[in-house]
Amino acid sequence: MASELPVLSEAANRDVLMTPADLIQNDALSAAILAQAVHSFGGRDKGGMPLLLCTTILPLVLHGQSSQQINRRRGDSALFRVAEENPRVSAGLEARVKAMMQQTFDALNVALATNCVVMESETRNLLPGSDLFPIDAGKPEVRAKLRAANRLGRWFAVVGLPQTYALLNLRM
């Protein structure tokens, strides 16, 4: 006798999928976050986002306090203010980058496979693909994460790799 799996309603699935653990471990959402950052970066810097910068996106956006601080600031130089006024944003960031490396690369694989992001063959920089990742951004938590990714992409393009790493107390 094969046991059947229970079938959840669409509403139940929506509620189950938006738990904090699922937000952090959802490859599709992570791919959408990376694609949003790369598209925003590409709007300012046509050379593409360096892979090293890409590794910091998820650890910043999926970290609750960091995401909140990012979403509170506007303007091209806001990364300076966020880093200066909120040391918690960079505190432990290097450890989070290392801990989330596999998740970042899994999400990047999804973004590349769906052509939301493309990799430039010579520099290996990430460029905007044909479209943004198709994800339902109806939940406030998802909208906030995508908004934070959009701001980070723009800020990283303005500030550049070496200065971003210095601001966030990261080693290359």
Image: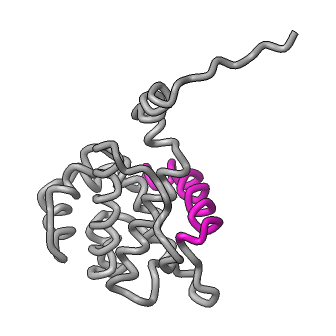
Considering depth in this image, is 51 or 41 the residue closer to the camera?
A: 41
Q: How is the image coloured?
A: one colour
Considering depth in this image, is 7 or 76 the residue closer to the camera?
A: 7
Magenta range: 95-116
Q: Residue at x 84, y 14 (%)?
A: 2
**In the image, residue 29 lies at what x, y percent?**
47, 51
Q: Residue at x 45, y 33 (%)?
A: 14
Split into 4 quadrants, where in the image is the C terminus? bottom left
Q: Residue at x 34, y 46 (%)?
A: 138
Say if the magenta span includes residue 42. Answer: no
Considering depth in this image, is 79 or 72 the residue closer to the camera?
A: 72
Q: How many marks?
A: 0
Left or right, 97 with reference to 111 = left
Split into 4 quadrants, where in the image is the N terminus? top right
Question: In the displayed structure, would residue 49 be above or below residue 31?
Answer: below
**In the image, residue 87 lies at what x, y percent?**
20, 54
Q: Quadrant of residue 122?
A: bottom right
Question: In the displayed structure, would residue 58 be above or below residue 36?
Answer: above
Q: Quadrant of residue 38?
A: bottom left
Left or right, 98 with reference to 156 = right
Q: Residue at x 15, y 67 (%)?
A: 74
Instruction: Name the residue furthest top.
Output: 1
**In the image, residue 99 lies at what x, y percent?**
51, 48
The kind of secondary structure the magenta stretch mainly shows is helix
**In the image, residue 128 lies at what x, y percent?**
48, 78
